[in-house]
Image (cartoon, helix red, strand yellow):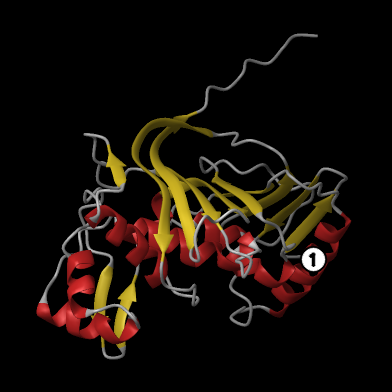
């Protein structure tokens, strides 16, 4: 019995797997590499039109909480198309059954679906709790969450982020919409930078505050940012909307680990329309609620 099955049509590519697919180069099973190669070819054959989002949907029977964006895009990065608009969603722990039996290696079923232009199907926005428009991102993207984290913290210190009176409940799921107003230098591909943008955004809402130890460890990681600027950013958590800290001091500096597993729906758009020499960021963070299920029609 095979550990996965892939089904492709003109409108969608579906994967059922008996093991959560891991990041490129960190796969525990060789068949994951074969699956990724098949997915890459299937996505090449998928009709993707300009001006519409590339959409990923993930669901699993595993009760352990997983990062949706990572599961769909980052862990499959070499298989993904280069696209400027992506959308993702985590299902309600009810993945569809595979078309044929597969080997559930770890005892759980994992389901991945990729399509074009579809909306979120299981969740819908409820209340917006934070919104920002064209805030400057002074630090270049570098594969980490730090440049985006700093952009939002600096913007909040400057009064550029609008907050509602509602905070997020502990362990509450939420959604995120992000727009990068890029310069001619980029970024251009949403998949290649989705993790650092989303993680940096969420981390800015955590309750990390200035301490001498944190500032000392973080300073070398923010080139071009003065000590006073970094302290001001650390002193201005956005809200905080998430009560736990996201930044941990390590032997090599700092590690940023936000509550990205609570982000159940998200959207990232890259537009080449920056009004300055830096890329700019717009977005909103919102609570979510289940989308009503339409009753079946009798024929």
Kindly identify the residue that appears in the image at 28 percent across and 61 percent down: 154
- As drawn, the residue found furthest toward the front would be 276
Residue 298 visible in the snapshot: yes
Depth check: 3 or 121 in front? 121
- Point out residue 31 in the picture as x, y percentages from the top left corner: 73, 74
Residue 1 appears in the figure: no
- Horizontal and vertical percent position of residue 58: 59, 50
Instruction: Report crowding for label 1: few under 14, some 14 to 19, many 20 or more residues within 10 A (C-alpha).
Output: some
Q: Residue at x 26, y 35 (%)?
A: 164
Could you tell me residue 106's position as x and y percent? 56, 65
Quarter in which the N terminus is drawn: bottom right
Direction from residue 271 to residue 159 in the image, left or right: left
Q: Identify which residue, 202 or 130, lies in the foreground.
A: 130
Q: Which residue is mark 1?
A: 40
**Above or below, comparing residue 96 to residue 289 in the picture:** below
> Is the residue 210 above or below the residue 71 in the image?
below
Residue displayed at 39% across by 50% down: 262
Does dot 1 land on a helix, a strand or a loop? helix
Judge whether 15 appears above or below 22 on screen: above
Quadrant of res 168: top left
Left or right of 216: which side holds 173? right
Splitting the image into 4 quarters, where does residue 199 fall?
bottom left
> Which quarter of the picture shows residue 29?
bottom right
> In x, y percent, where is residue 295?
63, 15
Vertical side of 126 occupied by 118: above or below: below
């Amino acid at each position: 019995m095979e550990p996965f099955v892939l089904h492709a049509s003109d409108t969608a590519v579906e994967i059922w797997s008996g093991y959560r697919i891991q990041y490129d180069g960190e796969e525990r099973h060789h068949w994951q590499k074969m699956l990724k190669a098949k997915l890459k070819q299937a996505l090449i054959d998928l009709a993707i039109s300009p001006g519409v989002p590339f959409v990923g949907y993930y669901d699993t029977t595993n009760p352990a909480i997983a990062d949706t964006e990572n599961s769909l895009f980052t862990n499959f990065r070499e298989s993904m198309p280069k696209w400027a608009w992506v959308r993702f969603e985590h299902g309600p722990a009810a993945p569809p059954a595979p078309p044929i039996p597969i080997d559930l290696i770890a005892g759980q079923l994992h389901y991945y679906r990729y399509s074009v232009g579809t909306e979120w199907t299981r969740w819908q926005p409820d209340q917006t709790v934070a919104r920002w428009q064209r805030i400057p991102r002074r630090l270049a993207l570098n594969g980490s969450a730090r440049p985006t984290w700093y952009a939002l913290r600096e913007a909040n210190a400057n009064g550029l982020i609008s907050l509602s009176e509602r905070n997020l409940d502990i362990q509450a799921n939420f959604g995120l919409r992000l727009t990068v107003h890029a310069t001619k230098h980029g970024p251009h591909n949403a998949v290649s930078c989705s993790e650092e943008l989303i993680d940096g955004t969420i981390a800015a809402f955590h309750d990390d505050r200035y301490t001498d130890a944190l500032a000392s460890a973080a300073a070398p990681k923010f080139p071009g940012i003065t000590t006073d600027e970094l302290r001001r950013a650390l002193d201005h958590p956005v809200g905080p909307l998430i009560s736990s800290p996201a930044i941990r001091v390590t032997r090599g500096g700092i590690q940023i680990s936000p509550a990205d597993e609570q982000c159940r729906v998200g959207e990232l758009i890259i537009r080449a329309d920056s009004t300055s020499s830096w890329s700019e960021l717009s977005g909103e963070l919102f609570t979510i609620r289940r989308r009503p299920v339409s009753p079946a029609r009798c024929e």
